[in-house]
Image (cartoon, grey):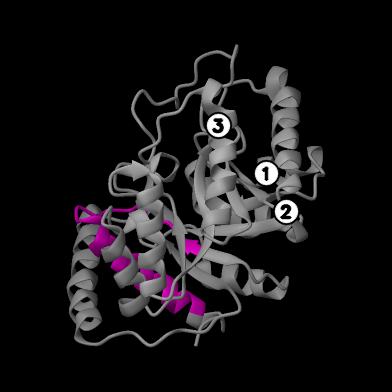
Amino acid sequence: MAEISRRDFIGGAGMAMGAYALSSRLAMAQQLKSPFKVAIINDEISQDFELACSVVSREFGLSWIELRSMWGKNMQSLTSAEIGEAKKILAKYGLKVTDIASPLFKVAWPGAPQSKFGKKGDSFKADFDFKHQQEVMEGGIELAKEFGTRRLRCFDFWRIDDVKPYRAAINAKLAEAAATCGKKGILLVLENEFECNTATGREAAATLAAIPSPHLMLNWDPGNAVMAGEMDAFPAAWDLLPKNRIGHCHVKNAVKGPEGKIQWAPVAVGYVDWTAQFKALKATGYHEAVSLETHWRGGNKPEEATRISWKGMKEALQNAGCLS
């Protein structure tokens, strides 16, 4: 996609927001049908979990939700009482959980040079270092069981400029974690994340080839791949991926902004052709989650930005013959 002007980008988004916000509040959405588990990551809407569930179910008409953080806490930090309350809210809105969006392995690899992507603050309310990762994994497994899902998301450590000296050890760690999850009946899904060592589709294909575990699959995120500089994430990088090892999919988009820098964008705007990507997923027989991870804010509150991104995602699903 070519560059877009700041005025067109912000102005168009603002017009779309006003029109969609008005129409979305006029009527309750009907429950939608899809070959996929169409979902939203809850905290992309609000830290108020009941509000997020209401929007997903009653406004968007969806039956699935992905869990990452709520009430100002990462899922890993919730008390037993808070977990119980979250389960009650899910039941109230008739929502099922696609996966636990855990922060597992989104930390520095020990002994490696400091990564420019390592954060001093939290990452989606998570603040765990390497020594806590066994605890994070065990907690994630228990959360998955509590919320009735078999999938637990992970990463492969903050990106190292030259990962080659550490790649084999990182792969071994991922294989070990996948084996542990497998023994508990849980599938580990590795997200290609632009800040981590598996960032692009090409890197994801290589990582999966190096770790042939049946308990490790890919959380495919073409938007993240674009953010990492892989502008042909779809279809070129997609074509390299083993389709039988895609276990989850995040939906967002990115575009080259007015200053030439890649930035998040609404789903309908960007390098990823989501209509074509949804068609390709359907053609493989994929039936797992396609989960909106808005990220783009457009100068507005997360709830409103997510409404705009959901509008684009919904249209792409419909155009692909994947939503009715």
Identified by mark 2, the residue type is: Leu
Q: Residue at x 80, y 45 (%)?
A: 213
Mark 3, residue position: 135
Element class at badge 3: helix
Residue lying at the far front of the rendered structure: 81
Image vertical order of residue 14 relative to residue 199, above or below = below
Task: From the image, state whether disc 1 or disc 3 is nearer to you.
Answer: 3
Q: Earlier in the sequence, mark 2 or mark 3?
A: 3
Where are the magenta residues, as a range? 291-317
Distance of label 1 from label 3 (alpha carbons)? 25 Å
- Give the foreground label among 2 and 3: 3
Which of the two labelled residues, at mark 1 and mark 2, occupies the earlier sequence position?
A: 1
- Please state the horizontal and vertical placement of residue 221, each as a whole percent of the image: 55, 53
Tell me the tag on residue 306: none
Q: How many marks?
A: 3
Mark 1, residue position: 204
> Would you say 95 lies left or right of 284 here?
left
Residue 297 in magenta stretch: yes
State if disc 3 and disc 1 touch (CB < 8 Å). Answer: no
